[in-house]
Each structure stands twice: as C-alpha cells, then as structure tokens.
Amino acid sequence: MGSYKIRRRVKPSARGVLYVARHVHTGRDVMLELIDADSALRAQIALETRGANKVPHRGIVDLLDHGVSPHGVWFATEKLRGESLARRLRRKKLDADEIAQIFSQLIDIVAAFQKLTLVHGGIDATQIVLEETAAEKVRVRLLDFGIVRKADKLFGSFAADEKREARESAERNALITRGLNVDILALGKLLKTILPRRFPRDRFAREFHYLRVAELCTADKPGKQLRNCEELGRQFQLASVKVAAPVEPSQWMYAFLVFGLLVAFGLVLAMGYAHRALPT
C-alpha cells in the first residue's frame, strides 16, 4: 500500500480492516486501514482526511498518509502505545482523579474541533486510547474520523451543498438542526459510562457532581444543554474541586454530647480531688 508493507492483520474496523504496516524507507510501524470504497465514499474519506489534518491538537492521532490501491482506499496513522478506554473500563474501575484527568483532556480535544466548526459525531470509549507518559500520567488520544463533518454553524443546520450528506445520518443531523451539539452529547454519555455504577455513600463526593455535568451534556432540549466546551470545562472544573462535606446536625449533637460527657467527667474528678484535700 503505497510505501507501506503490511505486516499483520489486527481486526475489522468500522468500514474496513485494520493492519499493522511498516514504512519501507524509515522502518516506522503504523496502523493502516483498508476500505473497499466506491467513488462517493472515496470523496467522503478525502473530505474527512482534510478535516482531520486541520485540527491542531496533540490529542488527535496523526494522519500520516493516504492513497488508493487496487484493493481499496487506505490511510495510515501513527501506531499508539496504550489501551483503549473501553478496555481500561473492563479491566478496572476509574476513581475520581482518573476521571478528572481523562475527561478534562477530552473536553480540550473537542474544543479544538469546535474552534474550526468541525463536528466529529462519533466519540465513544472504543475510539479513545490512553497512553502512559513518562510522568506516569495518562494522555488521551482520539482515533476515528469516520463521520467528521464540516458544519455551517456549530449549532445550526448544514450548508446547502451538504444537505444530501446530512440526510444520510438523519438522527445525528436532526440533533444538530434542533440546536444540540452532538459532540457535547457524546461527552455526556461517555462521562456516564465511566462513572462507577455504585456511587460512594458520601453525597458530597465528586462522582455526584460529575453526574450532574453529564446530565447537562445530555439534555435533549436547546437551551438546557451546555452550548460549548468552554461552558463544559467550567462546569467540570467546578465539579472536580474537592469540597469538604459540612457537618450534619446529628454530628453536631454527637460532638456536643461527647463534649458534655468529658466536662462531666472532669467535674467528677475535680470534686474527688477537692474532697480528698479537705482536713479530716
């Protein structure tokens, strides 16, 4: 495939097959996706490729090369070292700090799309790779650009020359036409997915505040949903602040009772010493 030699087949992708390939000149390993596409789909892939390359964010996987072969359309992306978010969730539960670290990076990535009025529309746990950095922190990388679209307005309808394309994904585009941001909606659904099923008993835990943020993202009416990543980032930052739980009235009563018992015990001791100190 072009300057790449296929080494092994990995798995089927959403539209084709994924392979590990190696650049014959540099020896660099890449992920290569091969798609059996007609002319219309080839034009769509070319549009998506141009859109993906315009987003200046390190969290988006690098698209290295693309072309056409007798077997179909192919494009090569960097080979990431990490595991998908879906696999991480199957392996372990995420604590509040891990949720904050992952989701704050996702907000930043989607914000880069929004600045260019691009809509990804396909963000889920399988398209997110978690890389471990040297500082033992997680770096989030977004993979797929299969349904990226150039929107006329961020929350409005599609441009006139894209009407036919918009009708092919009626559910998604109906949300946009209604004024809902589908990427914000996807982030809200994803946040609900990574939250633990059983919350801590402390109702002041950050997980409860994260759930409220997710509900704001997935609101299905214009005006109720968070409008952009700037608003989402503010809400999530507030939810991530560790706030000490206020003392409940029952706790005050318990503390007062303990204090009263200590005072009474002290008075008893004082009276005992005073009685012993009296002359016989």
Image: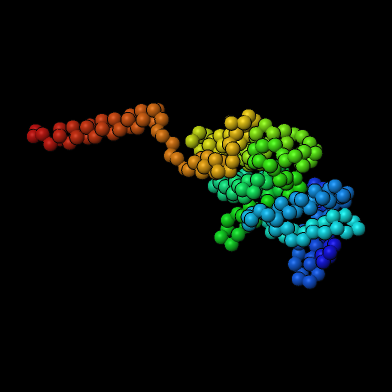
Residue farthest front in this picture? 160
Q: In this image, 211 relative to 46: left or right?
A: left
User: Which is more toward the observer, 168 or 274?
Assistant: 168
* Count of marks overlaid on the render: 0
x and y, in percent, of residue 194 in the image:
63, 42
Residue farthest right in this picture? 70
Residue 226 versus residue 129 in the image, above or below = above
User: Which is more toward the observer, 43 or 23?
Assistant: 43
x and y, in percent, of residue 163 in the image:
77, 38
Question: Residue visible at 44% across and 36% down?
Answer: 245
Colouring scheme, one of rainbow, by chain, secondary structure, one colour: rainbow
Question: Residue visible at 70% across and 56% down?
Answer: 53
Q: Quadrant of residue 193?
A: top right
x and y, in percent, of residue 235 in the image:
53, 40
Residue 212 versus residue 82 in the image, above or below = above
State whether residue 198 appears in this view: no
x and y, in percent, of residue 21 in the image:
80, 62
Question: Residue visible at 29% across and 30% down?
Answer: 260
